[in-house]
Image (cartoon, grey):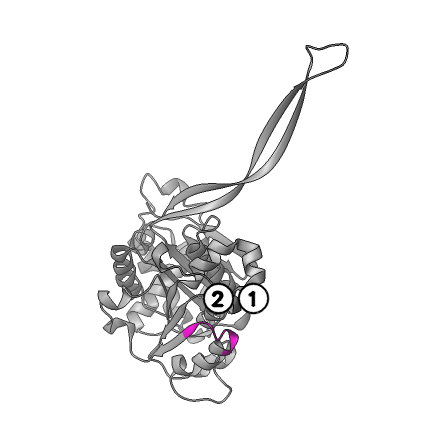
Amino acid sequence: MTNSKDIQNLTDDEAALYDRQIRLWGLDAQKRLRGSRVLLIGIGGLAAEVGKNIVLAGIKQLTILDENNVMGIDKYSQFLIPYGATGNRATLSVERLQNLNPMVAISALTDSNVTKDDMFFAEFDVVCATDTSRSELIRINKICREREICFFAGDVWSLFGFFFTDLQDHEFVEEELVSKIESDIDDDDQPLRKKTKIDQEKQLAKKTDYFVPLEDALNVDWSSESYAPLLKRTNSAYFTLQVLLEFRDKHKRNPKMDDLETLKELKNEVCQKINAPTNKVNDELLRVAHPLNPACAIVGGVLAQEIIKCISKQDAPFNNFFFFVPDECSGIVEKIGH
């Protein structure tokens, strides 16, 4: 994360632009945002929402890494690319992001994340990877842990979406209500009687939360003594995600509607690997196609919120999976892995 020595005072223009945010989360938090450097891998519909929100929040630098040219699915959710434009997605997304906040340095890289080594990732405080294979996510997460870089990964398929957070040992401050008891001697005819008044006031408390790497969170043995009792209450979204990630690793692409039968067959293999019953996979969530804008907006909004909380060190983060489940129309947080 950004060191205190890297945090500079805000200019008058920045103080004016971020006035409402400073009132919300404080000057120190805004300064931390102003000193942060974020890498966004992939710039589809989900990442477009994330990029928009963190640029508006006032980070220092956003680098977009995406080797792909504009695809047909981008018209459903990628609002940063001008209509009818052709070419690299990262390059085409810069202008509209820059217009949102000219004070943020925004750049695009058009090569693949698989070619990037440890030293490349060391230039950033936060890495957020989207539309990336499971094996590559695990590789990048390991690099981030070694370099003490905050790591996020997320995706949306149709209306189903998720993100994962690994902040390692994360310190933050959180408001707590503290009871304050005051006792006074009564001045009436009974001097030994006391009046007791209980007030509550808000105080900032320093806390630490601990995170596990993505590999540990995905490779849970659900027949183990620790996890077998938790199997019933764990949402099916986690197990469905495993199937979708496995498909992407095997076929080097995202699944489509006509891949449903292949996905149903793949769930047997995935569930056997993690010792989970196949009925924990929600077949309806496997009916996936291109990411749809409503889900991208919801998951991207919450993911951006978590990135801002991480950088500003304000409030408790989600630890460690967040799922948006369309048939329940709800967001669910699951903490999985030791």
Quadrant into which the N terminus falls: bottom left
The image shows a total of numbered marks equal to 2
Seen in the picture, residue 169 relative to 131 is either above or below; the reply is: above
For image coordinates 34% across by 57% down, the residue present is 5
Looking at the picture, tell me which residue is in the foreground, 259 or 90: 90
- Horizontal arrangement in the rendering, residue 270 relative to residue 285 (left or right): left
Q: Are discs 1 and 2 less than 8 Å apart at CB?
A: no
Q: Is residue 144 left or right of residue 91?
A: left
Residue 277's x, y, as percent?
38, 51
Q: Which mark is residue 16?
A: 1
Question: Which x, y percent locates residue 169?
Answer: 34, 47
* Mark 2 element type: loop
Start-end of magenta stretch: 99-105
Give, as a three-letter code, the residue at label 1. Answer: Ala
Instruction: Give, as a three-letter code, the residue at label 2.
Output: Thr
In percent of width and height, residue 316 lies at 47, 48
Q: Is residue 207 visible?
A: yes
